[in-house]
Structure formats: structure tokens, C-alpha cells
Image (spheres, helix red, strand yellow):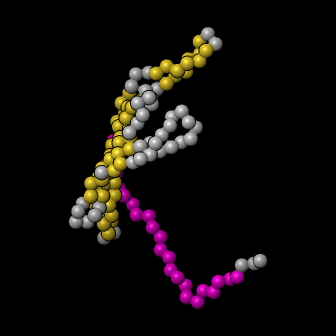
Amino acid sequence: RLVSDWSSDVCSSDLKATPFHGEIAIDPPTGAILRLTIQADLDWRLPLDRSDVMVEYRPEVKEQRTFICPSRSVSISRHRRTMVMDEWGESFKLYAPFETLLNEMRFEKYRIFGTTSRVLPGFVEVPKDK
């Protein structure tokens, strides 16, 4: 179980991480992460009411090697937009109704990006100029 002790202040210009909680599902025989969930613990006064993310992982075999790769992610957010109104020489904010957004992604067609290197024998370091 994940729990954070971070804090946030929406009135400040300092950006701070938002507190969250979540879970990690691990495959006991291999120690591989199978699922990660994170749910933000948002302040009630924010226009953002909910922000949750879940990522599922699965083994993927490429070039005779097994990699643990993300296979699916789902994010849910619930927010309302704000609009600034200027009337009679005054400005004020209006809140729209809450909207719930759902985003689901599937990951496939993985590629391996890598490089190779070798150490050359007999290398002598050149002294730095003073």
C-alpha cells in the first residue's frame, strides 16, 4: 500500500506535490510489478475533485529476453472549469459543473532501444590543460 505525506497549497505560487495513496500488486515468484494504482488526496476546495491512475504490466518476450512492460493504463479525473467574468468593472470566477474524464490506453508493438559499447585496452588518459 502506497501512502504519501506530501502537501499542496493551491493559493501559493510554490508548486508542491499532491498527497496520494495507492497500491502495488507484485508477482511473488518473480518480484515483477503487475499493477500500480495511485489516487490523489485532493483538497476539497480545488476545481479538481478526483485524479486516479492505474497501470497494468505484463511480461513481454523480445529477442529471447523477457521484459515487464506496461500493457494498459486507465486514468479518471473529475474537474470543473473556471471562467473569469468581467462585469461593471469587477472580475470574478465562475465554476462550471463537474465533468468526469476517462482515458484508457493499451500498449503494444514494443521495440527495444539499446546500445553496445566496449573498453579499448591500452587507453592512456590525456592530462587536462591548466
Task: Quadrant for residue 109, please give it.
Answer: bottom left
- Residue 11 picture location, percent across and down: 54, 33
Task: Quadrant for residue 101, please give it.
Answer: top left
Residue 106 visible? no
- Give the residue at x 58% y 37%: 13
62 to 97, vertically: above or below: below
- Give the residue at x 52% y 82%: 119
71 to 103, vertically: above or below: below
Q: Is residue 90 magenta?
A: no
Looking at the picture, tell me which residue is in the foreground, 42 or 28.
42
Looking at the picture, tell me which residue is in the foreground, 7 or 33.
7
Quadrant showing the C terminus: bottom right
- Residue 35 picture location, percent across and down: 29, 52
Q: Is residue 121 magenta?
A: yes
Looking at the picture, tell me which residue is in the foreground, 31 or 19.
19
Q: Which residues are magenta?
A: 104-127
- Residue 16 picture location, percent across and down: 51, 43
43 to 74, vertically: above or below: above
Residue 46 visible? yes
